[in-house]
Image: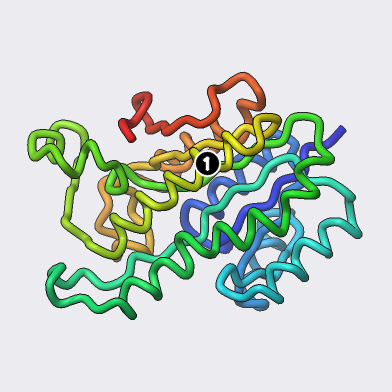
Amino acid sequence: MTTVTVITGANKGLGYETARRLIEQGHTVYVGARDAHRCEQAAKALGARPLLIDVTDDASVAAAAARVRVEGGRLDVLVNNAGIAGPSAAAGQLTAADLQQVFDTNVFGVVRTTRAFLPLLQEAARPTIVNVSSSLGSLAVNADPAAHTSILTAWAPLLAYNSSKAALNMLTVVYAQAFPQISVTSVDPGFTATDLNGHQGTQSVEEGAAVIVAAATAGSGQPSPAFSGATGPVPW
């Protein structure tokens, strides 16, 4: 039976490369994107199914889940990849509205999407949720100045982004505990050159996507919850 996978934010960057690799492995992939034209273009290029989904909009997410249900009746893998960087200003200059915008995609977007697709995941034999996080969301790494260089290739005190990824990691832990039949993991692709960082990253998307693909294909064989990077476990 073909593995059915939904990837949000998959029209470019890490999401696109993850989709390409999973299709190579035989997955039926829904390429999720909030722009209809880019969604169709990416799906056509990849040989995937387009899925219009804006993770900041309840109705859009519900419609996307309804479409997958009609077409397949189940979902094996959900990759919550859609994310934004937000402002890079100093912590004292950011407002609650600045953080709210970032959290609406990086945290609340994951809640919307996960909740909408949970019934479909529960129909699968070995369901998996992969949350694309970052070591910048690790409390242990951020609290330890030595870890800023020993664990990360690039660290920055980004109030909005870092705190949103820390919150995402907590979602991973709580969802894993609430749904033990579902493998729920956070992954850190590393400092990858994408639009998110103005292509300043030191890794290619091929390198960055490797840990996402690994988590998406591990099935019930991996610990849940878990937080993994390219070289192994990442401290929470």
In the picture provided, is 34 more to the left or to the right than 197?
right
**Total numbered badges shown on the rendered structure:** 1
**Residue 188, quarter of the rendered image:** top left
**Residue 230, quarter of the rendered image:** top left
Q: Is residue 61 above or below residue 120?
A: below
In the picture provided, is 65 more to the left or to the right than 158?
right
Q: Percent from the top left, x then y, of residue 47?
A: 73, 54
Q: Nearer the viewer, residue 29 or 82?
A: 82
Secondary-structure class at tag 1: helix
Question: Which quadrant: the C terminus?
Answer: top left
In the picture provided, is 198 more to the left or to the right than 183?
left
Q: Nearer the viewer, residue 120 or 209?
A: 120
Q: Percent from the top left, x then y, of residue 106?
A: 45, 61
Q: Percent from the top left, x then y, of residue 108?
A: 51, 64
Q: Is residue 189 above or below residue 38?
A: above
Query: Residue at coordinates 66% horizontally, 69% vertically from top-left?
Result: 53
Q: Nearer the viewer, residue 118 or 154?
A: 118
The residue to which callout 1 is attached is: 174
Q: Percent from the top left, x then y, of residue 222?
A: 56, 22
Q: Identity of the amino acid at label 1?
A: Val
Q: Nearer the viewer, residue 137 or 207?
A: 137
In the picture provided, is 139 more to the left or to the right than 188?
left
